[in-house]
């Protein structure tokens, strides 16, 4: 059975009990799979969560989490494969500060992409790199109408969106719904499945499997720092003051 991803329903759930369903090792180290997890795996331009898995009273650091062949693998420090067995009951605890920071930067990238779409409806979100030490998004701009001159207006709209306290809401929709609203992005999501989408205020939903803040007021201090053209793309770099 696939791992139940508890963070999809509640970004703020940082602790839970789980059961080990697999133990293996690769070039990144020893890792375990679990029947359910609160750890977000690296992906979608967002870093993985870290934290601890407690086994028999011993806290084992979770240093990296990734999705591998459909499985969420939790890489542990200071343990060998023989130290943990399938079926073992464990307690998971996420590094709250890191997880909340990652959700904040990820959410900021989504909001900024909406802002640029509102300035120029011909732009399309294409890529996100939501790492705190170098966060940016890329907007497809085939008409090449965008430029650095957009930055004052974009930052004004960002501040306005934060002040308006827009809610961030996720829900599952059909592939057909995504195809209708986001035809360009629908080519990158699986057909025939329920697709998780994120809606910010009145902006059009976007398919997204990441973690988010609950309301735009949590993005206070967000600022676009640089806009750079890369052929048919605008690279928009951002940070928090």
Image: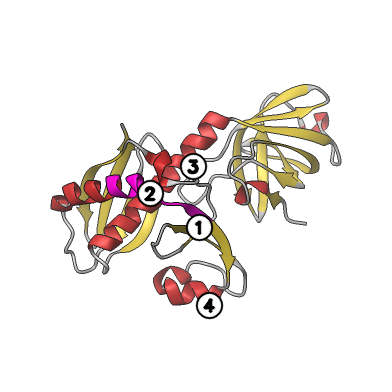
Q: Secondary structure at mark 3?
A: helix
- Compute the Cα span from label 2 to label 4: 25 Å
Mark 3 or mark 2: whose residue is earlier in sequence: 3
Q: Residue placed at 18% from the left, 51% from the top? A: 153
Check disc 3 and report the residue beneath it. Answer: 103
Check disc 1 and report the residue beneath it. Answer: 208
Task: Determine whether, in the image, residue 199 is placed left or right of residue 57.
Answer: left
Mark 1 or mark 4: whose residue is earlier in sequence: 4
Q: Pick the quarter of the image with the C terminus.
A: top left
- Residue 197 in the image: x percent, y percent? 52, 61
Q: Secondary structure at mark 4?
A: helix
Mark 1 or mark 3: whose residue is earlier in sequence: 3
Mark 4 or mark 3: whose residue is earlier in sequence: 3
- Residue 86 in the image: x percent, y percent? 84, 41
- Compute the Cα span from label 1 to label 2: 12 Å
Task: Determine whether, in the image, residue 108 is placed left or right of residue 119.
Answer: right
From this view, report whether residue 194 is shown above or below residue 19: below
Look at the numbered discs 3 and 2 and tell me whether their residues touch, using CB distance below 8 Å. no
Per the rendered image, the range of residues in magenta is: 159-169
Q: Is residue 163 magenta?
A: yes
Comparing 224 with 69, the one in front is: 224
Check disc 4 and report the residue beneath it. Answer: 176
């Amino acid at each position: 059975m696939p791992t139940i991803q508890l963070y999809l329903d509640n970004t703020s759930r940082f602790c839970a009990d789980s059961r080990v369903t697999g133990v293996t090792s690769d070039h990144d180290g020893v890792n375990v799979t679990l029947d359910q997890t609160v750890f977000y795996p690296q992906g979608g331009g967002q870093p993985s969560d870290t934290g601890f898995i407690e086994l028999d009273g011993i806290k084992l650091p979770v240093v990296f989490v990734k999705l591998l062949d459909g499985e969420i693998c939790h890489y542990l420090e200071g343990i060998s494969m023989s130290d943990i067995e399938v079926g073992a009951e464990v307690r998971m605890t996420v590094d709250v500060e890191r997880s909340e920071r990652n959700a904040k930067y990820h959410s900021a990238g989504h909001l900024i992409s909406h802002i640029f779409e509102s300035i120029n409806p011909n732009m399309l979100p294409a890529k996100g790199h939501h790492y705190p030490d170098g966060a940016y998004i890329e907007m497809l701009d085939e008409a090449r109408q965008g430029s650095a001159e957009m930055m004052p207006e974009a930052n004004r709209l960002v501040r306005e969106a934060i002040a308006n306290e827009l809610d961030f809401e996720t829900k599952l929709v059909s592939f057909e719904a995504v195809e209708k609203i986001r035809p360009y992005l629908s080519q990158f999501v699986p057909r025939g499945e329920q697709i998780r989408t994120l809606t910010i205020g009145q902006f059009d939903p976007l398919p997204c499997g990441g973690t988010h803040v609950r309301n735009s007021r949590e993005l206070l201090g967000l600022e676009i720092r640089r806009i750079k053209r890369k052929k048919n793309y605008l690279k928009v770099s951002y940070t928090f003051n």
